Amino acid sequence: MKKTKKSETVRHAQAAETKADTVGELLQDATAEAETIGEPEQAAKAAVKSAQKVKKGHRFLKAVSYVLLFLLVFAIVTGGIVFFYARYTKTHYEVTFYQESSQKVSGNVRIAVISDLHNREYGDDNSTLLSDLKSLKPDLILFTGDMVIREVDDYQSMLRLVSALKQVAPCYGVLGNHESERIYSLGDRDLPDKFEQAGLILLRNAAETIQIGENRIQLIGVEGTSYGFEEYGGRKFMDEVEIDPSAYCIVMAHIPILFDTQLSQYDFDLGIAGHTHGGIVNLPALGGLYTQEEGWLPKYSSGRLTLSRQQSLIISRGLGDSASFPPRINNMPELVVIDINWI
């Protein structure tokens, strides 16, 4: 009897174990089936995410292409504007008028300033420039240097211009760095004589007083560079020259920075310079972009400035260029006209 009960107990245990295995298998099957059912949903979600990434990539590439297209069009338009503006400045200039007042003059004195022409011709043989100067009727024409280009041997057109202008008004001037380099580096020793024979009175560390109507005008010409003022004799000359207190005194120097570092201590009325070509690029509200002497955003690039002793300094942007690059941008060549009136 006991043996029978034991056998039944074993059978019941085996049966329970079999059922448990069956339940386990069913659970595994159900889990596998659930996983099988979930795979398409996960795949769909992954596909959606991949499509979104591709779409975002396409949008980014599209935006980049638009930006590159805009930059390309902008570069083409800007390059075209600069090209045609540069060509325009080779055949056109503007006249800039300045007014100065002094008790040393009794009537109007008009001065035309020609600076940095660099062999440029406006009209055949400078007929346009000559015609404009005749119509302006200056009492005096001042040259602030760089009529020539250092590397160009032929400057006959500049000599012919001087010969024609001496019939309009007395012509005085100073040498620029291009003339000095031709004389001292390239051996063109006759250059000063050629210009003087044409009619230009060169003031090479020299002074001369002239009479215009009832007005006495003292002209002083100073040579030198920003690094060689003493070497060229500028300091010795300025220390020794007698400035006439009763005459209206004008000092000419090619390089404008000399007025800040070397010349402002002397008692003159008006300084005139050139050399900088207006800083090449004229930035609105900021002025010239660059000069060799001062670097970026220079103070002495163009226009009228007031020096330490209240002297006026007028810097011409010049009428020409010594090279085709860099081109002038927003910076027209100019003929300067200064009217000095009684105050």
Image (cartoon, helix red, strand yellow):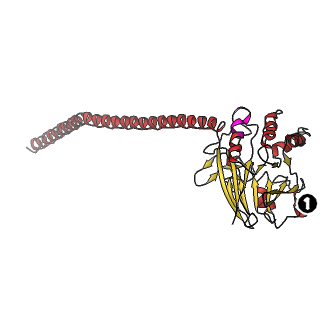
Callout 1 amino acid: Lys
- Residue 63, horizontal then vertical, whole percent: 42, 38
In the drawing, does residue 57 fall left or right of residue 71? left
User: Can you say which quadrant of the picture contains the C terminus?
Assistant: bottom right
**Can residue 100 be seen in the rendering of this structure?**
yes
The residue identified by callout 1 is 236
Total numbered labels placed on residues in the image: 1
For residue 202, above or below residue 77: below
- Magenta extent: 124-130
- Most prominent secondary structure in the magenta stretch? helix
- Residue 77, horizontal then vertical, whole percent: 53, 35
In the drawing, does residue 124 fall left or right of residue 286? right
Which residue is at the front of the view, 328 or 6?
328
In the drawing, does residue 237 fall left or right of residue 320? right
Q: Residue at x 80, y 66 (%)?
A: 267
Q: Looking at the rendering, which quadrant does residue 197 occupy?
A: top right
* Residue 129 among magenta residues: yes
- Residue 96, horizontal then vertical, whole percent: 65, 50
Q: Residues within 10 Å of mark 1 (few under 14, many from 20)?
A: few
Q: Residue at x 75, y 44 (%)?
A: 116
Element under disc 1: helix
Which residue is at the front of the view, 11 or 113?
113
For residue 239, above or below residue 40: below
**Can residue 324 be seen in the rendering of this structure?**
no
* Residue 88 among magenta residues: no
Q: Residue at x 82, y 67 (%)?
A: 246
**Of all residues shown, which one is farthest toward the left?**
1
